[in-house]
Amino acid sequence: MLSAVTGPTLAGSSLVMKLIEDRKEWAGLVDAARRGDAAAWPAIIDRFEDLAVASAVGLCGDLDEAPDIAQEAFVLAFRHIRDLDDPAAFPAWMLQLVRTATHRRTRRRQLASVSLDATTPNDGVGALVDPTASPDELVINAIEQANVRAAIEHLAEGERCVIALHYLAEMPYADVAAFLNINVSAAKKRAWSARARLKELLPMVTDALTAARPSGNNDFRDTILLFQAIRTHDPDSLKRLLAGDPTLATATEDWSPAEGFESSLGFSERATALIRAAGTGNVELVRLLVEAGAPVSEPCPCVDHESALVTAVNIDATDVVDYLLEQGASVDDGAFDGASTALHVAVHRKYPHLVQRLLAAGANPAATDANGRTAADWESLKAVRIPDTNPDEFLWTRIRAIDLFAPLRHGALVHIPPAYGLGAMRALCGIVDAVAPARWWMVGFEHGPYEPLEFEQEALNSGTPATIDLVGSGEAADRRRRFASSLERLTAAPGHKVVMCVPAPGHEHDVTLTLPGLQANPSVLTTVVVAPYSTEPPSIPEALPEGFDARLTFDGARARARRWPAIEPSRTLARVYPDARHEHIAGVARTALIEYALSDPEFALPDPHTFDNPDTAHQAQTLVRYLTHAFRPFEMLSATPAADTTIDELLNNVEHILNL
């Protein structure tokens, strides 16, 4: 639990004090954090925030982007502090975290023109803008800042790092050299070269770097602590933070699912503090934020645009729903691609008690989603779904691309290369729903982004019955014992299961040894093994890994184009197909999509007549659209009914599309 710092604090101190001179103090704080003392974190952030932002400026060259990168680096530090063996190595470790977040984060640079209407940092003008300045001064300021940004960006990375650490973090060149693992003469040479490049812009650049220093106030630190308090369900810390600065109630955090995977940050996207709190189901956190001024109906500034009310309805957080309705939350706003209202979501999730509450609060029963369906239309649609017709040997997943390219036998071992943020977990939730009644069991070892909290939230959001039983950090032998215990719990649990195994570096063999037993267990319908997390793009060989029956590969291009379930057919296949016809149709479809992707790699699906062979392009585009569909746990996202296509119907339709 986060609590007030008890002991000497480093708030307001500067890194002009050499790291070695106060190492005993900050290393003690880091050691306390490693042992679980959350009270150490405010002082750690105060001590290293300038260094983190300066490092981000040096690595990315963007003054606006740097604070977000540094914030992500601190989130990484929160999540993985127990992995740091030596507290004295924290500065170098922090640099690596900043480097990881910088390297993997999508850069959203806007260096070109600045609107004359932009009068605040959020409107595109940087930190040096005076809100009381005249229009002429604003124009001059905007031009100067554009020049400063361009000058910083065009410095070599090594030069930027030295200049940013020296002027922003106030580090002497000896410390800069030690921090960057270069000699002092090299640091001074880079600084001289940077100053020569900047020339007359140097005074403005140094002013900009000074203004970017987060230690000038507590906003940077407190925003990090705010979201940490929400994640850990800590109302005491949240209350204290909001009492000190009520404007924190409108704070946001921002990273995409892909960035989360690539930087070990977990699932996210841009979200407000209130939406994050509503997603925990903790009404006390929600109440504190609303009372501090969080707009109760403000939508998420992410691609889904859901409100706190929609978020709470989605996870059946009745207390939060009641409170938000009492506070006048808007009930008919649309969310997700399909513009589903809170009433739609309650029907999709089969929460009749929330349907009643929303109607009593004035929800419009005639409101339609993006495809023209009311909540009552969905109620009728869900009542007449095709019953389970799974063949004896193969599972019917209701996900067309999987049933076509990688039909899953009962008891199959399925390999998934790293696919974090590409819809793999949602596809797995769809499989669990298709073979219901079944339960999703996630066993294995925490590492990278694979932590219980993230997947418990995913299961909650999808309404998937789940047991997340990942083994945390510790000695290798102890982790193996705990993994064996989780497997015993899985085996003893009644009912059918879809099992996901998560190996970690150093524990791949432990998972491999368990696979024959899981495959032989009649209660396990299928076992999915994800490859260990890596920051590098996975290398996917053409052949299936030895011992596996199928592989599901997910594709970033299809995910970006929202062609869910984003299955990449060239590396998605099964060792055994139900029959020769099925294998033939899958092979022809796979070849058609591989060839089409050469001409349209981002799956924009332009007019077929713009291709050399319009008929072939039309066929492939029709197939892409046919294989793109919702699955039942996530119908509300697109407002499109899930595919209940039987395997026979699937093959007939693909055969027709391809004129076979």
Image (cartoon, helix red, strand yellow):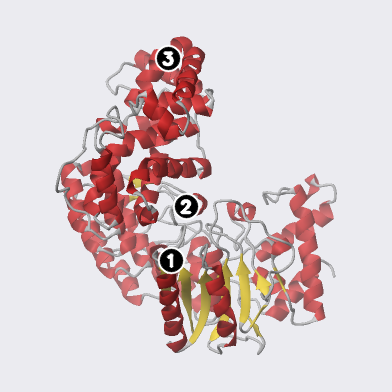
Q: Which quarter of the figure is the N terminus placed in?
A: bottom left
Identified at 85% across, 70% down, the residue is: 660
Horizontal arrangement in the rendering, residue 449 relative to residue 360 (left or right): right
Horizontal arrangement in the rendering, residue 64 relative to residue 618 (left or right): left
Marks 2/1: CA distance?
13 Å
Residue 401 on image: x %, y %: 67, 68
Identified at 62% across, 58% down, the residue is: 563
Label 2: which secondary element = helix
Residue 180 on image: x %, y %: 45, 33
- At label 3, which amino acid type do we have? Leu
Badge 2: residue crowd in 10 Å (few <14, some 14–19, many ≥20) = many
> Which of labels 3 and 2 is toward the front?
3
**Tag of residue 418:** none
**Tag of residue 202:** 3
Residue under circle 2? 260
Badge 1: residue crowd in 10 Å (few <14, some 14–19, many ≥20) = some
- At label 1, which amino acid type do we have? Phe
Marks 1/3: CA distance?
48 Å
Q: Residue furthest top?
A: 200
N-term-proximal mark, 1 vs 3: 3
Is there any visible trace of residue 124 in the rendered image?
no
Q: Toward which corner of the image does residue 359 lie, by quadrant? A: bottom left
Residue 584 on image: x %, y %: 82, 73
Is there any visible trace of residue 536 in the rendered image?
yes
